[in-house]
Amino acid sequence: NAGVTQTPKFRVLKTGQSMTLLCAQDMNHEYMYWYRQDPGMGLRLIHYSVGEGTTAKGEVPDGYNVSRLKKQNFLLGLESAAPSQTSVYFCASSYLASEAFFGQGTRLTVV
Amino acid sequence: DQQVKQNSPSLSVQEGRISILNCDYTNSMFDYFLWYKKYPAEGPTFLISISSIKDKNEDGRFTVFLNKSAKHLSLHIVPSQPGDSAVYFCAEYIRGDQFYFGTGTSLTVIP
């Protein structure tokens, strides 16, 4: 079992560029989440999904969009990257409201 | 306003001694709390949880205590081992809502 897989693991973007982070889980989990981790800020929820075709805003959604077209995939998009979006991004999934399983993270730098 | 607070950014203990990591919360309507452990360049991994109806949960060297009157929980690691050196996050789950994470405590176990 791969668990939760994030693609890519590292990326450097120029300000204004766009990109999509992919999260895939093979545990048939209903819930999926995107978090960002910044020094001294802990893990902050960007967007989440409670099932295929559904998405909801988390604590820090501005500048990001998401899609959950398939149950196993949750995509996080940055339409116009800004230096403030330099962070480590984590995807997670859970079966309903049980503990969440996290991916390895994507380190994004916006210059 | 931070829903879950970990007021100690770092903690150092000697190998074999007890490590106590603390977490305070504001919302009493939670379903359960979880502790996650995170090594550098890896995603957080689930460690232990406690439901709102319990005041203690134990799993091997790890014990979590919940004091609802003080809105406080703590994670005890006994005995501490060098491999326990990591960042520990507490997280609160409120049914129908989402996981709220603290800012993390970096534990260093000195051999």
Image (cartoon, rainbow, N blue to C red):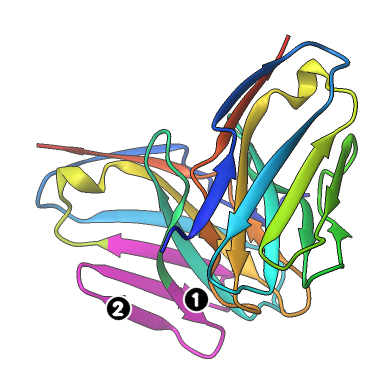
Residue A43 falls within the magenta-colored stretch: no
The reply to whether the C-beta atoms of the residues labelled 1 and 2 are less than 8 Å apart is: no
* Both marks 1 and 2 on one chain: yes
Q: Quadrant of residue B22?
A: bottom left
Disc tally is 2
The quadrant holding residue A51 is bottom right
The secondary structure that most of the magenta stretch takes on is strand
Which amino acid is tagged 2? Glu
Start and end of the magenta stretch?
A: B49-76
Q: Which residue is mark 2?
A: B58
Q: What residue is drawn where x is 39% and y is 34%?
A: B40
Chain designation of label 1:
B
For this rendering, which residue is in front, B22 or B104? B104
Of helix, strand and loop, which one carries label 2?
strand
> Of label 1 and label 2, which has the lower sequence position?
2
Instruction: Determine the residue positioned at 11% across, 45% down.
Output: B15
The quarter of the picture where the C terminus of chain B appears is top left
> Subunit of mark 2?
B
- Image quarter for residue A72? bottom right
For label 1, the crowd category at 10 Å Cα-Cα, with few meaning under 14, some 14 to 19 and many 20 or more, is some
Magenta includes B56?
yes
Residue that mark 1 sits on: B67
Q: Amino acid at mark 1?
A: Asn
- Image height of B21 relative to A79, above or below: below
